[in-house]
Image: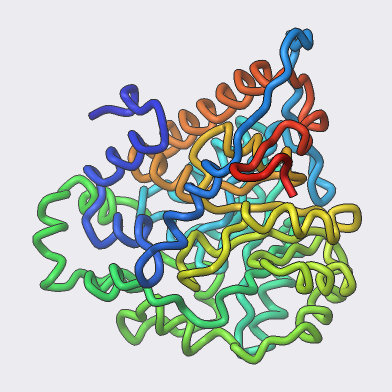
Amino acid sequence: MRLSQCHNFHDFRRLAEKRLPGPIFNYIDGAADDEGTYRRNTTAFEDVDLVPNVLAGVKDIDLSVTVMGQKLDLPVYCSPTALQRLFHHDGEHAVAAAAEKFGTMFGVSSLGTVSLAEVRKTYKNPQCYQFYFHKDRGLNRAMMEAAKEAGVEVMMLTVDSITGGNRERDLRTGFSIPFKLTLGGMYEFARRPMWGINYLTHEKFALPQLDDHVDMSGGAVSIGKYFTEMLDPSMTWDDVAEMVDFWGGQYCLKGIMSAADARRAVDIGCSGIVLSNHGGRQLDGSRTGFDQLGEIVDAVGDEIDVIMDGGVQRGTHVLKALSMGAKAVGLGRYYLYPLAAAGQPGVERALGQMKAELERDMRLMGCRDVSELNRENLRFRGSSLAG
């Protein structure tokens, strides 16, 4: 299978599976516990139908949106994800370059494998920094100061990961950071020699956002151990309010799921929230971002930018979220599989397909501009109107 044969999300996933060693593929592909929330993230979109209008004269399509003060040419962005240079040796550089080509935002994670400052200096499109709250308050402040100095536009604090989810695929494969080969994984890596060659012949794997603050020299640190030992489960709204004040700019909370928490985010001065269950990787059984979207937009949509992520595989999924009131939609696995499959060309192909789907589907919906999408375009199964 080749990149030219990838026409949708599932094609990219299959190509990524062919090219990645099993433990790394399963790190991307897996989720918490029984992975029910992971599956529901996508099937939730099937519970609502689009109702198009015809003869609307839709020759020209405008997909641009403004979210948290950032003008994006597409209503989707590449959500920050960890460890990208394990998936492809170009990692965040490939994703940032592809996002820049399509005029949209991308993000770097606290567990990113390329320096925040280096990426900000190289690419000019809007950038967000996905941030975890550590027990070491000095580390938190130092990481925010580094992001501010680099010129990052949006700080995105992840609030649903004060401890690691029970990702049983990772437990079975022994996936860890910094990455260490284990006897149990030798066979999988032997089956994927090109991955190993690329891993060994390119820039040494590192976690630049943490290297100056955390001693990683003591051997493999499991993903779960990182979350359990370094992150602070005692984080409160007062802690977040202090960080919002310190940042003094666009501040977003990722992992909000209840209307009450959305209201608190407004009250402490956040400019955006991402409805997210971390791709089903944290609390299995959690509600999906799309299922919660209407309730939260009704509660605070006039006061804060409401974004969602989770399970998006098609342009129609994005249109449904925008029609429910989301200002933009985050993509995760949607670009990670293409990254693993082919690096920057893979991510560009995936974003190009998303743009083409959105333009085609907007025409079929009879909408010229994203702002024209609304709940009149939707019908939920079993009800007369989206509620």
Instruction: Name the residue: 78% across, 58% down.
Output: 272
Q: How many marks?
A: 0
Q: Along the line of sight, which residue is nearer the eye, 354 or 145?
A: 354
At horizontal 66% and vertical 73% (from top left) the residue drawn is 143
Query: Which one is nearer the viewer's eye here, 179 or 363?
Result: 363
- Rendered view: 30 above or below 355: below
Answer yes or no: is residue 122 visible. Answer: no
Q: How is the image coloured?
A: rainbow
Residue 228, compared with residue 81, is above or below; it is: below
Q: Residue at x 20, y 45 (%)?
A: 194
At x 62%, y 38%, the residue is: 318
Q: Quadrant of residue 358?
A: top right
In the rendered image, which quarter is residue 245 located in? Answer: bottom right
Q: Is residue 367 above or below residue 387?
A: above
Camera sees residue 169 = yes
Quarter of the N terminus within the rendering:
top left
Q: Is residue 41 left or right of residue 53?
A: left
- Pick the residue in front: 79 or 34: 34
Report whether 335 appears left or right of 187. right
Which of the two residues, 338 or 281, is positioned nearer the viewer here? Answer: 281
Horizontal and vertical percent position of residue 113 = 47, 61
> Would residue 195 be found to the left or right of residue 128 on screen?
left
Residue 327 pos. (x, y %):
76, 45
Relative image position of residue 227 (x, y in whole percent)? 48, 81
The part of the image, by quadrant, that contains residue 160 is: bottom right
* Left or right of 229 on screen, residue 205: left
Q: Position of residue 13 (x, y in %)?
A: 34, 42
